[in-house]
Image (cartoon, rainbow, N blue to C red):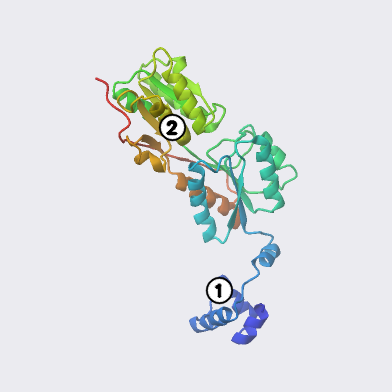
Amino acid sequence: MNLKDIAELAGVSTATVSRVINRSGPVSKATAGRVLRIIEEHGYVPDTIAKSLRMGQTKTIGFVVPDISNPFFPEVLNGAEAVCAGYGYNIILGNTNEDIDTESKVVRNLRQQRADGVLMILVDESGSTLRSGLAGASPSLPIVFIDRHIAGFRYDSVIIDNEGGTAQAAEYLIELGHTKIAIIHGPANTTPGGRRLYGYRKAMRAAGVAIRSEYVVEGDFRTRSGYELTRALMETPDPPTAIIGGNNLMTIGAFQCLADMGICVPHDVSLIGFDDFALASNLSPAITVVDRPTADMGRIAAELLLSRIEKRDESATRQVVLPTRLKIRDSCRRLA
């Protein structure tokens, strides 16, 4: 069964059948109903692959993430997927496991699968793995960066106000009377790690609160890192009274560590996380967090990408910066 067979059975032209299937162009309700009924009766499935090849498209979008086990990335993916599905695109996921060699291979694989465009949350912000992965690719391949700045590339991007987020957290703790405020942050050579650290420093300096070097510790954005860094902080001779977690997983690690050490949140130490997560509001105490619009990041990134693909948009490079907000719960206390 093909398009011509459907047209003959319905007594219409193949062009009319095509308009019905693609919902393009004027077709009377009666004719459309007749065509759709015949399609259903005969179980006709359009050959979307052949159509895509004729159009020079695969109707696929690549999505590169560093750690799919982190709840943040699936939430971004869900936002992007909702938009892409509305345009008839499928998403091919590439998980790099925070490994730069894997990252380069993932980008090459997406090229080999002829993805029409790529949404990228990369580990390597120097641009070297991306240059390697894109070697020989068309310079017109549409790409949108999410949550990162990649050196040497001029593509659209969607980021959040990382600096403002940690500044909000630090300012709130200072307002509660804290001066011994620590931050466990991700790699400072990444956009989220570096900008969140900068926001913390900026807020502390603005308030005239001393930044103690032993309270500023760097990890790798994972749970174990948050756990180990928190233990090291709390074992110092003069431990902090408050800790800011660099992301959701580091905050979970910090919370687990404090519980294991018998340190009570918030009575003994206050805790604020960056990124909301499902457990945050269900833990005891519920965790105060810097929330960011994760699904919106994916949605807006997909809209930017599809405007380049579908509308052949060649306007200047765009960067969208989304705000954060502090969700105050029960994990911080006011000092006397």
Q: Amino acid at mark 1?
A: Gly
In the drawing, does residue 138 fall left or right of residue 265? right
In the drawing, does residue 89 fall left or right of residue 52? left
Q: Amino acid at mark 2?
A: Thr
Q: Position of residue 238 (x, y in %)?
A: 39, 13
x 57%, y 54%: residue: 306
Split into 4 quadrants, where in the image is the N terminus? bottom right
Cα distance, mark 2 to mark 1?
A: 54 Å
Residue at the top extreme? 237
Residue indicated by mark 1: 25
Residue indicated by mark 2: 251
Q: Position of residue 98 (x, y in %)?
A: 60, 36
Say which of 306 and 291 sits in front: 291
Split into 4 quadrants, where in the image is the C terminus? top left
Between circles 2 and 1, the one closer to the viewer is 2
Q: Position of residue 194 (x, y in %)?
A: 52, 27
